[in-house]
Amino acid sequence: MTIGRREFIRGAAVAAGCAGATAAMASTESGASVAAPGVLVDTTLCVGCRACEAACSETNALPAPPADDKVFEQTRNTAQQAFTVVNRTVKADGTARYAKKQCMHCVSPGCASACPVRAMDKSPAGPVTYNAKKCMGCRYCMIACPFDIPKYEYESNTPRVRKCTFCADRQARGLSPACTEVCPSGALTFGKRSELLEVAKTRIYTNPGKYVPHVYGENEAGGTSWLYITDVDLTKLGFRDDVPQKPIPELVSGALGAPPFVMTLWPPLLMGLFAFSKRRDEEKDEAGKETRHG
Amino acid sequence: MASPATATLSPARAFIREKIFLGMDLKDYLKSNLTAFNIVSAIILAVGIPLLVIRFAYGLGATTNLSQTAPWGLWIGFDMMTGIVLAAGGFTIGATVQLFGLHDYHAIERPAILTAFLGYVMAIIGLLADLGRPWNIVMAIFNYGTASALFEVAWCVMCYSTVLFLEFTLPASEWLGLKRWQAIMKKALIALTVLSVMFSTMHQSALGSLFLLAPTKLHPLWYTPFIFIFFFISAIVAGLCMVIVEGALSHRAFQSLVDHHVDMDKLTIGLGKAAAIVMFAYFFLKVQGVIDGHAWGLLLTPYGALFLVEVVGFVLVPSLLFAWGARNRKVKVVRFAGAMGVLGIVLNRLNVSVIAFNWNQPVRYVPSWMEFVVSISLCLIGVIAFRWVVYRMPILREQNARAAH
Amino acid sequence: MSHDFLSIYFAKSLEYVVAVGYLLLFIPFWRYVQGGRPAEVPAGADIRRPAEDFLRVRAPATARPAMAVRPAGATAPRPTAGWFHLPAGYLLHPGHTWARLDADGLVSVGVDDFAAKLVGPGRVDLPALGDRLAQGEPAAEIGHDDRTVPMLAPVDGTVVAVNATASEKPDALEDPYGAGWLFKVKPSHLAADFRQLLADAPARRFLEDAGEEIAMRLSPGLATVLQDGGTPIHGIAQALAGDDWDQLARQYFLT
């Protein structure tokens, strides 16, 4: 049977389509989809202009961040009204280094696994989203996050959990997150996480001695969408260094596997115990009757 | 058995007088309630209940000291977690009587189940006070966050509270004379007991599993991948100790209602023996947990001292006291050890959820006075409800079968 | 938690050592806990001990029949255990009358401690000599003021003697088991009748139940035991139910 040109092209297209689809569904080692979004933060390039803070507050209808650079005198945390903050540290030679802090949008998010009502959820497109309509305010996501990101509106009587949204609605429209779009110095690069990981490692390899040889977010919490490379100790910029190097949900999955086994095993075990003790009681009664009549 | 005065009342008013006002008319009943305990309780509740209203009106920030680094405080640590563990007597004694066949303990089965039921109700109220958006608690029924240990806790608590409520309807239906329901519940008791042990196993341990995902936030002396086993075993310990303590207290407070044929001392000694063994094992479990976590070096730190106080002072010491007291039939010693055991489990739950949690944060959480008052108020409501039920329903003794001569 | 690999060996060995140590300690610990003297069972443990009367009659107590039984090896009686007592040898009818088989084959009949205190001192109406009584049928009446309540006969038989003192003196019922006996009966179905009556432990339990019902009515809201008051002059029923005391009493006396 000969294959004509049309069949060949059609066959090739189908094959290519399958390959593409498989590639899209393929996961990296961390379980992230190959097409998952990510941001590479190169702190050596950040100049501390805080345009990202301004863009974020504008996009999310938050109050504008303080314009004064005096804010750098303290290491700040994100807050109910500030989804991202930039912190500063000074190197030994006097140069300042800055780093932007926000939700890391973990590949396997602890907060989403912790939420009993899926108000915190991992969307297939990548961002970890929050839905106040489902939230009951248990604040377990705050317990779960190893980066201490979710913040709570304690002063409200209809409080919400507040954190960076990764501009999920912008991404859905094909745009990049607001902060990455306005960054003037190229410190923030938005793209595919798998590719950005390669870029990060390449920068480290091709600049020996310049960077700390570690991509923060490659394995932290099992891998995060936001990747950091830096030439200073990140703890000086408000980051935690004690984050577990495996996905947070994995810490719980073992214990959570028990309930179905308990539900299966306990009834026969307990009923067996009941039958055994009833039998023992009956034997005691029979023995008692015998001695009385005997 | 209507009192003569009710013979002239309408059936509804006779019912109220007999069943609710204990056979007195309203004036006498109100007068009989003017006791010191009631007056002090009224004062505390007069502050506590408005505080709850303020919390719902103005939010958590107005009434608690919770912060971004302390998302869980006294209401979760005490009202919910301690409340649920101290209510573990329900399934412990239920299993002892119905499944292990030790029918001697039947006399304390009903008070234990009542304590458990009221304990869970109070824990749920405390939870609703703590939740930021409590109206969304029903979301757990429709959204299945099954990756979460808290989902398991929520569902098991819901199911177990239902089981407890059904078990409670047995004395309630005897009180109201609902013979059909009484018969149904009597037949269902074994199944309910099996379910109660099953649900209790799951959620008592799941309350420990809650902390599995915060290894960097819970102090290493308390954090272990086996924390869910520890929580389950300590729930059994709490159940036994709480039944001993609550039995002693209610036999003193409700002396006129108690069935004096029950040898409470013998039951207490028996419970003490069980508690001695379980607490002995639990102590070694905690030791193993520390070794497994390579954390023995931390025993020399201040948190290590707290850990030793909890584990040696309030687990090992009461275990030995139980052993000595049970062997030598010293009931008072057994009761004292029971009180120590209860305190030990309370301390454990507070340590895990509040004191040793986020231990490495610079600013630590201290509960506000309003949180204390609300917690005390909820405890008081539980005690008052317990007393209300005990005076009317056959809890401390079987229904008086006068007609059965 | 990831630890330095080599430290795992020490930790795991320590765990096993502790586990073995625990097992070795567990055996003697178990035996220690389970050992010890078995519970002392006082002789007649199930018998309710008659405790001191909680409500004493105002007048000094006349000699009570010296038959208040205390089982051997009794420990201190509990304060609310039994406000109403029943001497040994007396059988109780559920209507709160008692029967006692005398040496001469006759059965003495009276009302019990509970009935006496419930109604209080007052009038006693006795059956006539020669009256034929049936067990469970009204035989005598006790009461005060203008009203009396009937009391049921505990046995079948013919009335052969009545206690005139009881019907004459208002405080006769202060000693309901002794000087307060009401009448004597020549029994016609002695064995069958006595099988229907309560004795010893069941009788004491019956009285105790009645006492606790009364206690609940008297002080349900208080956690403490009743103060040591005396019997209200006109009996407990009057204190509880006022003018309807007789309705209350009839409930207990089954009349």
Image (cartoon, coloured by chain):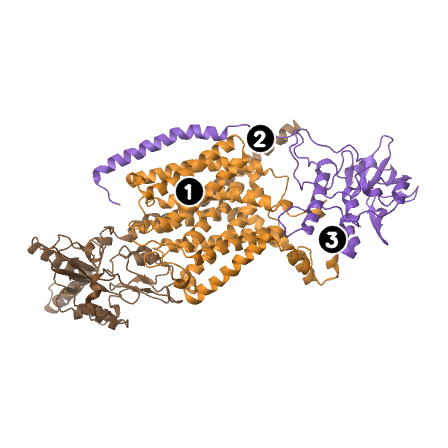
Chain colours: A brown, B orange, C purple
Q: Amino acid at mark 3?
A: Leu
- What is the x, y in percent for residue A4? 11, 67
Same chain? Circles 2 and 1: no
Question: Label 1's element?
Answer: helix
| Residue B148 vertical placement versus B311 (above, below) | below
- Are circles 1 and 3 on residues that touch, CB within 8 Å? no
Which residue is label 3 attached to? C240
Which residue is label 2 attached to? C39
Q: Is residue A149 left or right of residue C110?
A: left
**Is residue B184 in view from this perspective?**
no
For the residues marked 1 and 3, what is the alpha-carbon distance in whole angstroms? 51 Å
- What is the x, y in percent for residue B263? 60, 37
- Are circles 2 and 1 on residues that touch, CB within 8 Å? no
For the residues marked 2 and 1, what is the alpha-carbon distance in whole angstroms? 29 Å
- What is the x, y in percent for residue C79? 66, 40
- Counting residues from the start of the chain, the first of labels 2 and 3 encountered is 2
- The residue sitting at 87% across, 31% down in the picture is C104
